[in-house]
Amino acid sequence: MWRALARFSLSQFRHVAGKSLSPVTCSGRTLQVVPVESSPAVVSGLLSNGGLARFFSDQSAVHSSDLDPAEDGPAGAVEMASGESDSDQVEDFAAEYGSAGAVEMASGESDDDRMECSRAESREISPEEMENVLSLLQGTADGSLESKLDGMHLPVHEEFVLTVLETPLIAGGNLIRFFKWASSKPSEFQVTRTVAGALVRAVCKGEPLKKEAYVLWDLVREIGEKAKGEAVLDRGILNELLSLFSRLGKGRAALEVLDKFDEFGCVPDSASYYSTVDALCKCNTYELAWPVCERMINSGTLPDGEEVGKVMSWLCKGKLAKSAHDLYSAAKEKGKIPPPSAISLLIVSLSREDKTVKLARENLGDFDEEARRYAIKPFSAVISGLCRSKELDGAKKLLHEMIEAGPPPGNAVFNSVVNGFSKAREMETAMEVKKLMEQRGLKPDLFTYTVIMSGFVSGGEMEAACKLLKEAKKKHKTLSPVMYHTLIRGYCKLEEFDKALELLREMKNFGVKPNTDEYSKLIQSLCLKALDTDTAEKLLEEMKESGLYLNGITRGLVRAVKELQGEELAAEETRIEA
């Protein structure tokens, strides 16, 4: 069933159509449409000066000739209804009574009709009044803003509110105060989804203060709670708020917004979850970010690969590498592939823990051929992790894979493997890896020699360790004190103090300055094991000349041992005399 509502005057003609035949309120009066079975008839008398009349028939629309403009007054509203709408008759009606407006035919509900009629009856706001309102709002806010608006005696309706909200250069705080002022007049203005959305967009597109952001959220939450099941808020409005809190780094506020989605009849999408996680991670509340990620994964709504990569990176920063891996696995199933940089960071982070290093090893296969060429950092991290967790065979296998397929391993990778086998005292394998290193044109550095020497010394193989020292002296102009320190400790452990002292002299001749550790180890060993305080005192003098100072405990040890030796010597002389 169609009907046409025509409001006509000398300057305007408008009509809307709908299905309902319910009463319509206009100028505070209500008219009821009563169907007529046969021919068109005037059901209700025309109201003068902007009144309303409804004409209805099951078969045809009322023609304009059924109306008498002399009785209707200079302006009025006419509603015609029939089984089929006839725009030509409406246009004839407009032509006869005079109009210069637009004609619109549509199907609608009675609520829309009442709103249209209400707007038609509302007083228009003049340009001067609008200019005064905007000037007030664009100025500096003070406590009298609301009272000044009241003093303007403005008709408050949706179009007016929307016009203000869509005007640029109005501070967010003033927009919120204006909206609250308009909402305080429920007889004139009702909050709709359109108006609520305009408010949120207007405030969020600027640079609102943190306080204004919280006030806006309180207002939106109040609107949603008062709606009582009506869909006044939507996902777009709430996502705007989430994006705002994300920019401000207010994670807990963003989480509060996300938790209200269900109550307000909205379903979060990938943007909702991403903005919330972003806000939580910006304030380092990673322990709250992961549960949101879990909700996102369970909902099956993941953002694009780029954003997934960012979330993975945040979780890794928060030491939640395993959680980042779970997100990565879910993203791969959805075809949302993060950038190589995010995958690299994930692998490096997984490699730091023994319990997740195998996951890191598995993910190395996710690099394509091009990305693998530049993935030396994650491959090195996995090698190091495998060696630390004593998965030496796996580390060696990965090393050979890198040699065959890339990325080409450098000294750092080889040294990790050499160090791992040396600590495990698998010296034969350690030497094999060193040889492989040299075959690839790499020069073993001082660290390479030091860790292998340390392995030999730990096993008491001092001859093999000294052989490596000689080789290192040939290939490197300078040596590190650690290399000598390792050998000196080894000889002291074996109580071969002469060789330890010889290494100390050689160390000086080769240009390596002994430090306190070398002297301290030798002096302690000489005192406790060899009871050679004379040599220990000579070493103390050398330290003084070199500007080194021994700690009080070791110096006291020398004095104590010397005194003990003196007492023993005196006792021995007494026995001889006796």
Image (spheres, rainbow, N blue to C red):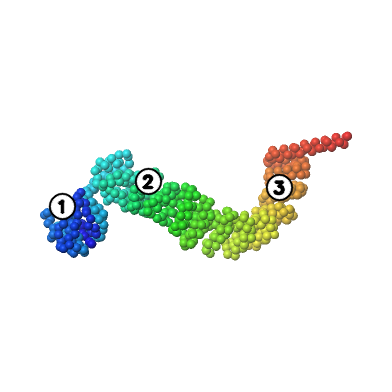
Q: In what element is the residue under mark 3? A: helix
State the mark number for residue 218: 2
Q: In what element is the residue under mark 1? A: loop
Which amino acid does the dot numbered 1 rest on? Leu
Rate crowding at label 3 as few (under 14), some (14 to 19) or many (20 or more) other CA atoms within 10 Å.
few
Rate crowding at label 2 as few (under 14), some (14 to 19) or many (20 or more) other CA atoms within 10 Å.
few
Q: Nearer the viewer, mark 3 or mark 2?
A: 2
Residue 142: % across, % down: 32, 39
Looking at the image, residue 365 sits to the left or right of residue 433; the answer is: left
Distance Cα–Cα, label 3 vs label 2: 75 Å
Distance Cα–Cα, label 3 vs label 1: 118 Å
Report the residue marked by disc 1. 47
Dot placed on the residue nearer the N-terminal end, 3 or 2: 2
Dividing the image into 4 quarters, which one contains the C terminus?
top right
Image point (70%, 39%), residue name: 553
Question: Of residues 347 and 370, which is closer to you in this image?
Answer: 347
Dot placed on the residue nearer the N-terminal end, 3 or 1: 1
Distance Cα–Cα, label 1 vs label 2: 46 Å
Question: Of residues 35 and 174, which is closer to you in this image?
Answer: 35
Dot placed on the residue nearer the N-terminal end, 1 or 2: 1
Question: Of residues 154 and 409, which is closer to you in this image?
Answer: 154
Which amino acid does the dot numbered 2 rest on? Asp
